Structure formats: C-alpha cells, structure tokens
Amino acid sequence: MEQKNTLRTKIKNILAAGLIGLAGLVQTATAEVKPSEIRTTGDVTYFVGGEAKSGAQTSYLQIDHSTTFPYNFKVSGFMDLYENGNGYFGKTILEKGLVDRLNLRSHITHVNDPFSQAGLGLSYALPTPKGTYAKVGYLPFFVDDKQIVCIGAGIELAKDLTLSAFGEMNIAAEKGPEWCYGEVELAKKFGKHFSVGANLQLNRKGPGEATPEVVPRLSLRYLF
C-alpha cells in the first residue's frame, strides 16, 4: 500500500510539473500575439439517443471548442450538459507541438466539478492522404493509475459529407484492457453552419470489458 501511495505521489508530481510546463507554454504562446494569429472554431450539438443498458447518458447538449495559437499550441475540449439535473461532463485537451508530428498532450476532465482528473502523455498525427486525418495518443500518467490510449480519425467522403471516429481505452485497468468511450459519426453539412449526423455512441460496459456498448443516435449541430 505504501509503494502504491508513493507511486501516486510521483505521478501527481509529474502531472503537476507537466501542467505547469504547459501553462508556461500558454503564456509564451500568447505573449505579444496579435488577435489575427489566434484561430477559434466551435459548435453546439444536440444528441438524441435511446436508453443505454450501461446507464450512460445518450441525449444531451454538447458544446465544443478549439483554439489554435502560434508556436504549435492548441486548446480544445467539450462540455456535455446532461438533462433532468444529471450534471455535466467535460474535457479540456492541451497540446504543444514538440517535433515534426509529435505533441505533448494533457487531458483535464470535469465531472460535475471544474477539476476532476488530469493525465499527461504524447500524441502523434499520422501522415494521411488529403481529405483525411488520424491521430493516436498515449497518456501513461494519471493519478488513479490508469493509462489511456486514444485514437481519432476522419475522412471527407464527398463534398460536405464526412465520416469520423474517436475512442479511448484504459490499458492498465485492474481486470485487463477496458474500453472507456468513443463515437463514430457520418455527418452531412447543410450550408455553412448546420449539419445532421448518424452517430454511434460507444460506451463503457464495465470493468475488464474491452468492447463497447453501441447506442445509435442522431446529431443536430450548429457550427460557428
């Protein structure tokens, strides 16, 4: 038990140092930067889904944002606002380019609280053909001993028609690799600001379950 507490203390120290370092990079990246050099995008999405056996929320309002700064620094994230007084869940992702396609990456989660959890690791943007993207990440430093592998990818199938997916897995779960969360979505854009999508919500089933629970949903999105 003492060794486990010592390990958690070390991980907390690493996370603290990493987040302080990222905060310093934010300050550096934004110092004397012209507003025109900062690019921000975002959207508001309402998901409509049926009941999930896992108990996961399926219908809710989500707010997404992404801001790119000079010096290869990016802040993105989302906030899910649950219905019927069930609180909220959000995540903030900080990324700083290190070399070529390799990034320092941090996750900060918000579960009915501004700061619930944090992780630190690396991400890598894979070289892909035009009209596609793919990124993988590995975050080995979390205070609760988990290690997260994450992946995201997308492709433009036709004009204003895209297929995208993302997912996360805890490879250090007590009962073996455990699926955390993900989504697959086929979305059609109408004009500059609206899109409608067929969304598959990939929920965590339980301890030691490496495959997700799949819940079909509809997404209605307004893009800024």
Image (cartoon, rainbow, N blue to C red):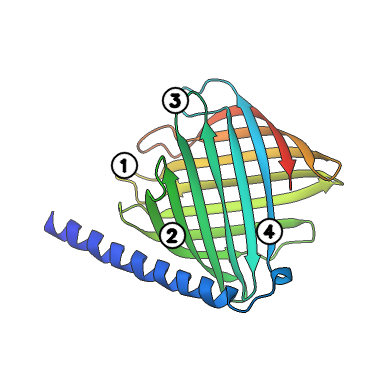
Q: Is residue 107 left or right of residue 189?
A: left
Spatial separation of the CA atoms under disc 2 and disc 1: 19 Å
Spatial separation of the CA atoms under disc 4 and disc 2: 25 Å
- What is the three-letter code of the residue carrying label 2? Leu
Q: Earlier in the sequence, mark 2 or mark 1?
A: 2
Spatial separation of the CA atoms under disc 3 and disc 4: 34 Å
Which disc, if any, is residue 55?
A: 3
**Is residue 129 positioned above or below 111 on the image?**
below
- What is the three-letter code of the residue carrying label 1? Lys
Query: Which residue is rendered at x = 77% and y = 38% of the image?
Result: 195
Taking depth in this image into account, of 156 and 20 the one nearest to the observer is 20
Q: Which residue was labeled with disc 4?
A: 40
Query: Which residue is rendered at x = 71% and y = 37% of the image?
Result: 221
Spatial separation of the CA atoms under disc 1 and disc 3: 21 Å
Q: Earlier in the sequence, mark 4 or mark 2?
A: 4
Element under disc 1:
loop
- What is the three-letter code of the residue carrying label 3? Gly
Say which of marks 4 and 2 sits in front: 4
Say which of marks 2 and 1 sits in front: 2
Q: Which residue was labeled with disc 1?
A: 175
Q: Which residue was labeled with disc 2?
A: 139
Taking depth in this image into account, of 1 and 105 the one nearest to the observer is 105
Q: Earlier in the sequence, mark 3 or mark 2?
A: 3
Q: Quadrant of residue 39?
A: bottom right
Q: Earlier in the sequence, mark 3 or mark 4?
A: 4
**Is residue 14 positioned above or below 185 on the image?**
below
Assess whether mark 4 and mark 3 are in contact (beta carbons under 8 angstroms). Answer: no
Spatial separation of the CA atoms under disc 3 and disc 2: 26 Å
Element under disc 4:
strand
Spatial separation of the CA atoms under disc 4 and disc 1: 40 Å
**Crowd tier of the residue under label 3, counting other residues whose Cα lies within 10 Å: few below 14, some 14–19, many 20 or above:** few
